[in-house]
Image: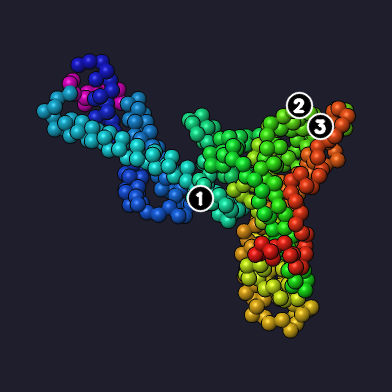
Amino acid sequence: MGKFTRRWILPLVYFTDNWLSRIGLFLLLSATVLWIFLTGASAASGYLGILQFVALPATFFLGLVLVPLGISLQRRRESPDHHVLPDKIDLANRRVLRFLLFVGGATCANLIIGGALTYQTVHYMESTNFCGTACHVMAPEFAAYQAGAHAQVKCVECHIGEGAGNAIRAKVNGTRQLFLVTTGRYQRPIPSPPHGLKAAGETCENCHSPRHDYGQRLWRRTQFNDAGERLETALMLKLGAIHRAHRGVSYEAADERRSRMLAVRTKSGAEYATDGYRAGKETAVFRRDMDCLDCHNRPAHEFENPERSVDQMMTEGRLPQRLPLFRKAALDALRGEYAPGAAAAALPARLLAFYEKNQPAVPREELVKAGRELVSLYERNVFPAMRVGWGTYPQHLGHTDSPGCFRCHGDELKPKKAGQGLTQDCEACHKVIGVEEKDLKAMQELGG
């Protein structure tokens, strides 16, 4: 009999009868049975998905580790030269034959089940459901994603990218985030640092071609004053010119939110900077080549502006247009501070209290319906437990929610050489058709 056979094969036959190996076998069988029962079940719940595609595979492979570990420990206690071991493997011995058949069958089954579990786990962890619901700290981002224009785009298409390197980095980062969530050390609100931001060429440009000329587009907004009168604003945006002008631009930012720029360099080589930056009194946090995501900084996770949202809902008829002071009352209710989970009752009550004090003749039924709509708007954008409120994640597109365009086109950045600075001409980006006009004739002529 060979040395390897005597030292390893024979002990494998006789030394599997120990408590550690039995625990391993129990975990293997339990994970396998549960996996069979859950196969085909819906993973709409993030927690069910974690059980099915994370916990069960972990349990299965833990069992595979414990079985040989128990054998190894048993071998240390009982010498391979113990008198109960036979001198050779005899296939005529039914016990030996049955065990070898069991090992062969179990190995094939483990390969099939383990492979299936591994594949399903990787597939599930790339799903939008896993990203959005498996971790409660992502509730604000998931709510904004579901209400956004990119709700049909999978998270991994923008946040991970293609290739094995990106996948490995994402899993390592995910492991770090899991530790932070488990220990409660995660930041509130979740930051969105631009250091690891994918370039638009890897994400946005997979769908939106940079070679396309977007020309001019009509932009309009309907607002309501306290008397319920409609006020129209309309601009003709020069999208093609805007996109062309910002190609080949690089910048250095003062903060990770990119709310203030310290230096800008254009494609032509022109340089602009703040006085503090040139004097060495200000230091940039990072440098980046400008692309889509520096203005469209919340493309798939845009949180709503309360004023614009209320105006839009009033325009669509989801909120009353003719109630006196309704816009003011709605914004007052939306901006109220409520404990986690309390807004569903407290916000409508605040709206009713406003009208009971200022306009008691207003029908209660209409206010109750409006209160439900406002609660829905609030719960999509405000998450007290995560310290996410109105304006926590500003949109840099335009210049209404944040300095936006004026981060570069303001007064702070001055040219390195004497001459014209970065343009501040409104007409360079849009032509004004009308601003907050009651009867905007141009829109009437266009059929709006």
Foreground: 51 or 299?
299
Disc 1 from disc 3: Cα separation: 40 Å
Task: Find numbered disc 1 in the image and state the secondary structure of the residue it sits on.
Answer: loop
In the rendered image, the vertical position of residue 72 relative to residue 443, given as above or below: above
Residue at 82%, 43% in the rendered image: 424
Density class for disc 2 (Cα within 10 Å; few <14, some 14-19, many ≥20) is few
Numbered disc in front, either 3 or 2: 2
Which residue appears farthest toward the front when viewing the image? 445
Q: How many marks?
A: 3
Q: Which residues are magenta?
A: 78-88
Look at mark 2 in the image and give the residue it sits on: 269
Q: Is residue 145 magenta?
A: no
Q: Is residue 85 magenta?
A: yes
Where's the N terminus, which quadrant? top left
Rendered image: mark on residue 81:
none
Label 3 close to label 2 by CB (< 8 Å): no
Numbered disc in front, either 1 or 3: 3
Which residue appears farthest toward the bottom when viewing the image? 361
Evaluate whether residue 363 shows in this view: yes
Rendered image: mark on residue 152:
1
Where, by quadrant of the figure, is residue 359 drawn? bottom right
Residue at 28%, 20% in the rendered image: 7
Left-right relation of 339 to 420: left
Foreground: 167 or 266?
266
Is tag 1's residue or tag 2's residue first in the polypeptide sequence?
Answer: 1
Rendered image: mark on residue 272:
3
Where, by quadrant of the figure, is residue 44 drawn? bottom left
Amino acid identity at mark 3: Tyr
Residue 421: image location, x then y, percent: 84, 35
Where's the C terminus, which quadrant? bottom right
Magenta: main secondary structure: loop
Label 1 close to label 2 by CB (< 8 Å): no
